Each structure stands twice: as structure tokens, then as C-alpha cells.
Amino acid sequence: GPPRRRRRPGGRAQARNPRSTRPATEAPEGAPPAGGATAGPGGGRALPDTLQHAFLVAPPARACDVASRALRAVGARRALVFMNRRRRLDDAAGKLSAGDRRVGTLHAGMDKEERKTALLRFRRGKTDVLVVSGVAARGLDVEGCDCVVNLETASDAQGYAHRAGRAGRAGRPGVVLSVVPPREAFVMRKFGRSLGVRIPEGRLREGALSAGGAALVCPPGDPAPGAPASA
């Protein structure tokens, strides 16, 4: 039948939906929190325009090699590398440890002290690259991170935005790179449309990375506390 109506004291009758149990002050599911980032054109989370985005196409067997070259090309000082599968973290960390690059890992299988130590080493500049699983990265906030690399594609645009937001905190410039197999190149364009950002395909050539007609370079910055200054 029609919804029952109840009368508030001194007021007009108000329709009551018997199926609704959500308090009036609770935001609908999927709505951005009050005071948070605004939504992009496709309903996705907005990202600061201080970030440069690009994707590189590579078969899975060469993804780590391409990511390693890209990190060197953009001059990343402290980078977070995101993966979806924990079992691949150690293998990826080993492959990314090229030359004098110091690489650590962070995943849900670590205990509290191990996680604390991994983050502390990264924050203090004793680790240049931290390879993390998606679950372990929840709530991760590292000041001074200038580059994010998606070695495995985020599940959706919101996941991409949360990862990308780890770079360039407090309005600082940053670089967000994704290394994807050929079949996933269209996903990057889809994410870009949803978030209202350009994610062009990048090109590595002669030790430099460019995308959309512009060079991608991480901003110069002070070394992390406890880290040696660059020569």
C-alpha cells in the first residue's frame, strides 16, 4: 500500500519509507566524505593537477625491466611501486634492485614491527623504492614520495586515484606511471576519462621518458632525513 505518513509536532505530515533504515546524516554509499576531494567528470575522485601521468606498454615478462628504466629516466628519489599479488613482490623487488638502487617491500604478511621498520627506512631515505601490495598500502602516507609506479593495474579508477595520490603530497609535483600489457592499454584511457586527467602513452628513449609531447621528470628536492646528499 501507500507509505504511511506521520505528523511531527507543529509540522506538516512527512512521508516515511518503511524500507529505508539509513540515518538522514549518513552519506550514500560511494559518496565522497565531507570536506574530501571533489569528484572528477566521470564521478571519480579528483586528482591534483601537479601530477604527471603516463603509461608504458610492455609484456609481463619485461614489466620490471621497463619500470626500472622508467624510474631512472624520471629521476625518482623515493618511489612507491604498487602490485596486486603479494607472492610477486619479492621477485619484483629483486628485479628492480638495479645498480645501487635500494628496494624494500611492504605487504600484509609482515608483522607490525616489520611493517614499521620498512616504512621507517623508506621515510628516512635508506630505501629508494618500496614495493607494496594493495592491501598493505591502505592509509599509507609518506611525505616526500615523488613517484608512483603501478606495476600491476589497479582494479578501478578509484584504486588508481588512491595510489596516485601518494605522490606529490601537499601540492608538490609528482609522476605517476603505469606499466601495462598491451591488452590493458585501453584501461588507462578509461581511468583518465573517469578521473578527468590525461594519461597518455609514454615513450622511453635514450634514457628519457616523454608522454603527450612533454618530458616526465620528478621534481628536485631535499634528501630524506638521514639520507646522503646527491653528489
Image: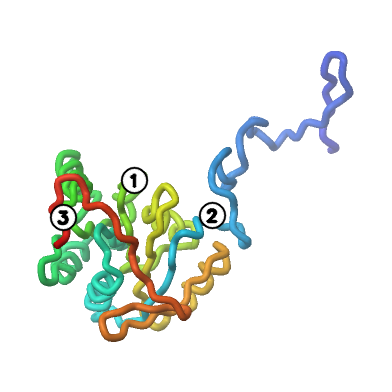
Q: Residue at x 84, y 38 (%)?
A: 1
Dot label at residue 141 = 1
Relative depth, front residue between 192 and 214: 214
Q: Earlier in the sequence, mark 1 or mark 2?
A: 2
Relative depth, front residue between 128 and 12: 128
Looking at the rendered structure, the secondary structure element under dot 3 is loop
Q: Residue at x 10, y 66 (%)?
A: 100
Looking at the rendered structure, the secondary structure element under dot 1 is loop
Q: Position of residue 85 (x, y in %)?
A: 28, 62
Q: Position of residue 132 (x, y in %)?
A: 26, 56
Drawn side of residue 94 relative to residue 55, left or right = left
Q: Residue at x 39, y 83 (%)?
A: 182
Mark 1 and 2 residues: CB-CB less than 8 Å, in contact?
no
Q: Position of residue 142 (x, y in %)?
A: 30, 47
Please tell me in which quadrant of the rendered image residue 66 appears. Answer: bottom left
Q: Amino acid at mark 3?
A: Ala
Dot label at residue 45 = 2
Q: Amino acid at mark 1?
A: Asp
Mark 2 and 3 residues: CB-CB less than 8 Å, in contact?
no
Above or below residue 113? Residue 11 is: above
The residue at which mark 3 appears reads as 229
Q: Amino acid at mark 2?
A: Arg
Tag count: 3
Q: Using the rendered image of the protein, determine whether residue 184 is visible from the camera's viewpoint.
A: no
Drawn side of residue 127 relative to residue 14, left or right = left
Q: Residue furthest bottom?
A: 206
